[in-house]
Amino acid sequence: MRYDGDRKKNRAGGNLPRGAGRCPERRAAGDPGGAPPRAGVVGQRDRRRRDGHVNDLDKARKALKDHFGYDAFRPGQQGVVEALLSGRDALAVMPTGAGKSVCYQVPGIVLDGLTLVVSPLVSLMGDQVRALLDAGVRGAYLNSTLTPGQQATVLRRALAGAYQIMYVAPERLSDPRFLAFAREAALPLVAVDEAHCVSQWGQDFRPSYLAIGDFIGQLPKRPAVAAFTATATERVRRDIVRLLDLRDPYEVVTGFDRPNLYFGVERLEPKRKVARIASYALEHPLESGIVYCSTRKDTDKVHAALVAAGVRATRYHAGMSAADRTESQRAFITDDAPVMVATNAFGMGIDKSNVRYVVHHNMPGSLEAYYQEAGRAGRDGEPSTCLLFWSDGDVSTCRFFIEQESGNEELTPKEADAVRASRRRLLEAMCGYCLTTGCLRRYILDYFGDQQVPSACQPAEQADAAEVSGTESCGSKPSSRPEGRYVGLSPQSPAPETPSLTLRTTGDFSCGNCSNCAGDFEAVDVTDTARAVMRCVQELRGRFGKGMVVDVLRGSQNAKVLDLHLDQAASFHTVDAPASQVKEVVELLAAGGYLVITEGSYPVVGLGPRAREAAEDGFSLSMKRVVRKAERARKAAGGAGKAFGTTFGGSGTAPSAEEVPALFERLRALRKRLADEAGVPPYIVFSDATLRDMCAKLPATEDEFLDVSGVGATKLARYGAAFLEELAAWQGEEGAE
């Protein structure tokens, strides 16, 4: 397959080791494009790197402070920066908001030459470059939004040394003219953003990413290569290393836990979803939020409903004109319309730090996609909310989209089949997230292979006795979890060939900050129904779909059942549960690998690789029963849990005008005025977190202003006088009172 050997053979001249077969003469001379020297063997170039390392790191820290206003690197950043400054490849997996951009921007400032950033975010490159320019960094972008003349000007200026960092789309790398430019330019570093797009096992596979390795291999001098992603399982990480040909990369996985995010899941009928979303938005009028929909039609419908309800909302999807999309994005970024209703065409790379909630109107097709989209909330570290409303129809829609992906003309039939099979496994894991009765945060971490105990997690038996406000205690590690009855589903780090899900015990963890741990449902034992389903599927020999399985189990007398004589089956009318519950049990078993639901025009249900486990004595299964409003009210009155839809996470209900700090609002107004004058989004001036730090520190001098988090020399020079004047005016007014 093209993902595997063919491209490697073309680049390396056969089945040679990584890095072999390209330019042995350069490798022998100590060029960084070759394999790293063995331990104890230090060449002249390596001694120069070692001797200059401390000096480069000092330059990096100075660049971090001067351009971005931070005194120290965040966890995981410094190691990546050090590796890239020394010429070593790197792979960084960091959650949204962890500061991945700094990991290549700071080296791009310090290193001589042009740092190339490969990104699929064509619509956002302009904002990314404006943010760099505002920080005093010489940046540019090259994509299809520029005229041929503008593109030629950018390339000419780049060769003249006008830029430090340039953003390009992956499709650009296949252009012979761009390759000629790159071969002439001095490229010390190539950074690949959203690197999971190179893997067929990722949630957003893009064939154009497969050309990146070829492009790098054709450069006369191999640069350091850095790959960045927020969502990558171990399998995807291995694909990234292999397909981008990363050589002895420095790898860092900072963890996937976002403790400031509250996760909520609820099954809702489609007609109830819009009302719930409108209600939530109206309860939080001062907060910015994103509402994701799976289709353009749903996006338009939800947007119209929100506007009719009095919510300042805009919309974004690929069916809109480029001008309308640009205007919608501007209105959202500037808080003119703080609520964005969009398909997944919106949001990747959006650096709006004050998004307080992300609501999914439909279930996404993978947990990777969900976590990346949900992760756009709370990038500033403030408490934020992630809500997922789903229905059976969402699952069907996802399966339809999976089928449509086979039409990608860039893929061979064999490759398309592989991508489709991968998407099915991803969908099963997503269904498992919706159906699990365990901690949602723990489910996410398990899926990505993160074995750390989530922040504020504790053993479930301790959580029952803890205060709802939450004691931040971490319980035993997963390896020492207590025995308990199996409830719900959670994923296990998949083996390379057969990723699967496994059941999780009730005694695991309670994070106290998700709807499952808050007790917004009851766990209903459905073991008997699950075993009846397994017997029925076995008896029907995998020849029928989910609907027929349900009809047989519930003793339906419809014509098709009778015509096929399925009323004579041993499993006929062996279940009295509602049809919706039986269907959910089928999905739950499929998510766990006990059943397999095929794709195509007529999907059928068959036994999965773990079918035998369902017959074992220790097997049991539970599913959710949502606790309705009256019951939640009684719980809330007793001090247990949170009322779903009212106090999600730290977001809470909307504060009154009196509760909003007057100084903070004044600084926000000043930020908005300065941003409008400069023609940039407000976050480019200062983030909400920086404004809050100003409120706390009340700087009166330029030196004190530099101590504010997020303020560097460039921002001081550009905005310092205006903000110091506003702070002084406020303090004078407060003193006069």
Image (cartoon, helix red, strand yellow):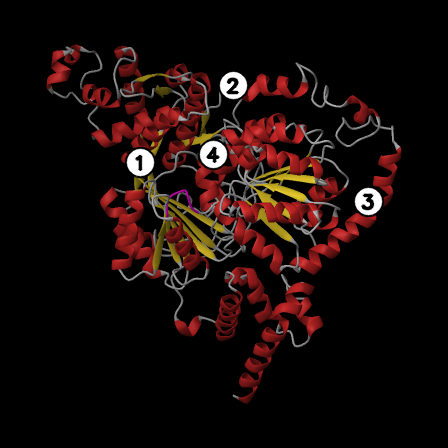
The span picked out in magenta is 342-346
Decide: is 593 above or below 55: above
Dot 3: what SS?
helix
What residue sits 48% from the left and 75% below the top?
Answer: 662
Quickly name the residue at label 1.
394
Magenta span main SS: loop
Residue 345 within the segment the image draws in magenta: yes
Quickly name the residue at label 2.
497
483 or 35: nearer the eye? 35
What residue sits 50% from the left and 29% below the top?
Answer: 207
* Mark pair 3, 4: CA separation: 37 Å
Instruction: Please indicate whether residue 133 sits to the left or right of residue 259 in the image.
Output: right
Q: Which amino acid, mark 4?
A: Asp
Decide: is 590 above or below 675: above
Badge 1 crowding class, 10 Å Cα cut-off, few under 14, some 14 to 19, many 20 or more, is some
Q: Residue 150 appears at what percent x and percent y?
A: 56, 49
Quickly name the residue at label 3.
53
595 or 301: nearer the eye? 301
Q: Quadrant of residue 609?
A: top left
Q: Earlier in the sequence, mark 1 or mark 4?
A: 4
Badge 2 crowding class, 10 Å Cα cut-off, few under 14, some 14 to 19, many 20 or more, is few
Q: Are marks 3 and 4 in contact (CB under 8 Å)?
A: no
Q: Earlier in the sequence, mark 2 or mark 3?
A: 3
164 or 225: nearer the eye? 164
Q: Earlier in the sequence, mark 2 or mark 1?
A: 1
